[in-house]
Amino acid sequence: MGNKSNCKSGIRRGAAGALLVYETFNHLTSWLQDARQHSSSNMLIMLIGNKSDLESRRDVKRKEGEAFAREHGLTCMETSAKTACNVEEAFINTAKEIYRKIQQGLFDVHNEANGIKIGPKQSISTSLGPSVSQGNCRDMGSNSGCC
């Protein structure tokens, strides 16, 4: 999301979740307002700080991202598109949080307007397995996890 107008076209009414990816805070507040304005109040918004591989050259430090997430009631984590650190995990965590909201009854799974469509019945495990990001995060230490 390089500019403010990209966010509006990226949010779909009826979405169960959205990833709000940032490198700077330049437009983050307005993107968040747009996302909330164009979605249901139950939609999960995951705040994703990108470029975690560039610790010394980052515009927004991890603690600043965590503070923004707390202030706005968001779930957050950091990723690196370059190294793939936590990229898959961001989607998995978003799916887990949406599933948790379904279990709490916050989404009516029989109403596709909530962004959830029931597929064919399958026997699936409720566990999504171990963290997939562990092998992708080299030399990042504690900077690779969730906020």
Image (cartoon, helix red, strand yellow):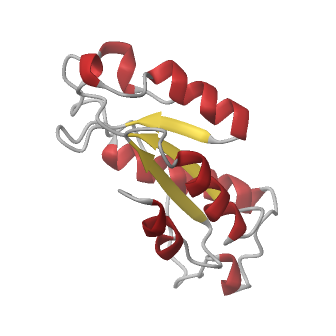
- What residue appears at the point 49 percent right and 30 percent down from the top-left corner? 146
Q: Does residue 35 sit above or below 23 in this rendering?
A: below
Quarter-of-image position of residue 42:
bottom right
* Viewer-side residue, 124 vs 41: 41
* Number of on-image labels: 0
Quadrant occupied by the C terminus = top right
Residue 35 on image: x %, y %: 62, 63
Asked if residue 147 can be seen in this view, the reply is no
Q: Does residue 78 sit above or below 102 in this rendering?
A: above
Quarter-of-image position of residue 71:
top right
- What residue appears at the point 78 percent right and 63 percent down from the top-left corner? 41
Quadrant occupied by the N terminus = bottom left
- What residue appears at the point 68 percent right and 31 percent down from the top-left corner? 70
- What residue appears at the point 80 percent right and 63 percent down from the top-left corner? 106
Residue 89 on image: x %, y %: 39, 44
Asked if residue 82 can be seen in this view, the reply is yes
* Viewer-side residue, 85 vs 131: 85
Q: Which residue lies furthest to the right in this view?
A: 105
Residue 44 on image: x %, y %: 64, 56
